[in-house]
């Protein structure tokens, strides 16, 4: 009896110990089964973040073993964050990225094909330009745009009228634009110092890259030739640098190089500048910070941009905002990220997403763009001119993804490295600060870019 009791007690201890061990290990086991995907996107505004939260929660209802960690990163900061993550060998599972980043990473074999996402939407329901941008020579799709939009010149009509300018007539040439901007640059309080400037620009490298390629393209120029060699010393680029210097000296605030993108919107709202370059998401900012100007109809956009002296009036390059979703193929649970993208583009989910910033996040799905429920959004009536300007530019004026002055640049595998190197921004700032002449700055940038492309193993000339 005593033996039986002892055996029972030992058995009980063993059972208790085993149970305690199981209890300790159970959370670890469950955590090991949990599939985590890390998501970066470029929509930090509260409305879109709330929609992303909702879409993620709905996805997890049918995928209870999945955890999605999403982070909103301003698109001006995303390149630097991505470079750091790649250097550390720790990129996210799923992220939005510029087209040039998608192309660069795809050339290195780092991205998962998203053919299933395109097929789940229906390729005939995707606008042709999106199919074109994301279809590679091997027939695969390594990215898909989350939405589209176009960069425009945003103006204060009241300041144009005060200067005796017609706010409904866009400048056709750089000369016309400069004359307008000079007239808009004034000493408004009579203290002998300029306190309102014709144009506000953002100073960080990312935004200088944006402006440079748009202006070079609008001057009939390019940044790379047929074999990918930089063309920074060609006349069209030199003329662009000369124009930038003249613009800096007459019509930009002295501290523009330290201004952020959001600063430019604040300066337009508060009357420190008369015009900026920007996107449809600015409507919400102006409604909040310049309600009187909005109520008076004095925040407006041009539906064209001026051409340079070597360009053709009426033909211009502006930025096509078509940031891609991309999935890193070697990331844990990359297959789950693809499933999530298919869920994201389902009509009910995607409609909520594009409606979160309706004047900026224009849909890639034809059916959504024609959906009466989508078109009934009151923002389209309130900001009809801004939306129509973008639609007109996208349909008629052939906007291009960032750093691509010509569609052939899609095939260049090194534009992300050029963008992140600071070479283009240094070229511009050297000129506007009077450190180098346009040709000297261009020659220096040309040499640096050629050296970088050679180091990357992409030289073909």
Image (cartoon, grey):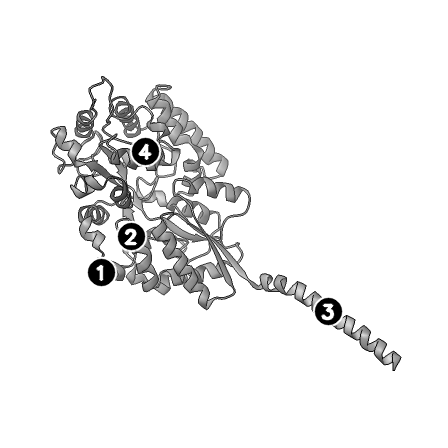
Q: Distance between the residues labelled 4 and 2?
A: 23 Å
Q: Distance between the residues labelled 4 and 1?
A: 34 Å
Quick one: SS at disc 3? helix
Looking at the rendered image, the quarter that the N terminus falls into is: bottom right
Q: Which of marks 4 and 1 is in front?
A: 1
State the residue position of label 3. Answer: 18
The residue carrying pointer 2 sits among few (fewer than 14), some (14 to 19) or many (20 or more) residues within 10 Å by Cα, namely few
Q: Which of marks 1 and 2 is nearer the N terminus?
A: 2
The residue carrying pointer 1 sits among few (fewer than 14), some (14 to 19) or many (20 or more) residues within 10 Å by Cα, namely few
State the residue position of label 2. Answer: 129
Residue 81 placed where, x, y %? 47, 42
Residue positioned 14% across, 28% down in the render: 163
State the residue position of label 1. Answer: 370
Comparing 258 with 136, the one in front is 258
The residue carrying pointer 3 sits among few (fewer than 14), some (14 to 19) or many (20 or more) residues within 10 Å by Cα, namely few
Q: Report the disc number at residue 212.
A: 4
Residue 55 placed where, x, y %? 39, 60
């Amino acid at each position: 009896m005593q033996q039986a009791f002892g055996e029972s007690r030992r058995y009980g201890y063993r059972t208790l110990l085993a149970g305690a061990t199981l209890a300790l290990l159970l959370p670890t086991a469950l955590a090991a089964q949990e599939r985590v995907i890390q998501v970066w996107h470029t929509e930090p505004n509260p409305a879109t973040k709330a929609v992303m939260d909702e879409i993620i929660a709905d996805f997890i209802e049918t995928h209870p073993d999945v955890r999605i960690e999403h982070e909103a990163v301003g698109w001006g900061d995303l390149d630097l964050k991505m470079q750091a993550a790649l250097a550390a060998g720790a990129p996210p599972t799923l992220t939005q990225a510029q087209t040039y980043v998608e192309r660069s990473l795809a050339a290195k074999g780092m991205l998962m094909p998203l053919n299933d996402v395109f097929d789940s939407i229906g390729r005939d329901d995707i606008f042709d330009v999106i199919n074109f941008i994301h279809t590679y020579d091997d027939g695969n799709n390594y990215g898909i745009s989350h939405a589209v939009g176009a960069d425009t010149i945003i103006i204060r009509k009241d300041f144009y009228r005060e200067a005796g300018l017609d706010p409904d007539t866009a400048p056709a040439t750089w000369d016309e634009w400069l004359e307008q901007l000079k007239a808009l640059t004034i000493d408004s309080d009579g203290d002998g110092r300029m306190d309102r400037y014709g144009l506000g620009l953002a100073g960080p490298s990312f935004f200088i890259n944006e402006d440079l390629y748009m202006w070079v393209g609008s001057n009939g120029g390019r940044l790379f030739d047929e074999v990918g060699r930089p063309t920074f010393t060609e006349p069209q680029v030199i003329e662009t640098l000369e124009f930038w210097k003249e613009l800096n000296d007459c019509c930009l605030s002295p501290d523009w190089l330290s201004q952020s993108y959001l600063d430019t919107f604040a300066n337009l709202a508060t009357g420190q500048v008369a015009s900026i370059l920007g996107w449809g998401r600015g409507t919400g900012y102006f409604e909040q910070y310049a309600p009187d100007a909005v109520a008076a109809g004095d925040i407006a956009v041009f539906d064209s941009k001026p051409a340079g002296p070597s360009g053709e009036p009426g033909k211009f390059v502006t930025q096509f905002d078509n940031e891609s979703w991309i999935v890193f193929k070697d990331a844990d649970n990359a297959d789950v990220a693809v499933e999530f993208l298919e869920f994201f583009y389902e009509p009910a989910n995607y409609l909520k997403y594009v409606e979160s910033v309706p004047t900026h996040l224009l849909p890639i799905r034809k059916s959504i763009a024609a959906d009466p429920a989508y078109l009934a959004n009151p923002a389209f009536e309130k900001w009809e001119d801004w939306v129509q300007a973008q639609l007109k530019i996208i349909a008629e004026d052939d906007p291009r993804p960032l750093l691509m002055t010509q569609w052939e640049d899609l095939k260049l595998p090194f534009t992300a490295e050029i963008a992140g190197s600071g070479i283009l921004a240094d070229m511009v700032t050297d000129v506007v600060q009077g450190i180098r002449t346009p040709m000297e700055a261009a020659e220096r940038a040309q040499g640096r870019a050629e050296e970088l492309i050679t180091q990357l193993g992409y030289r073909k000339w």
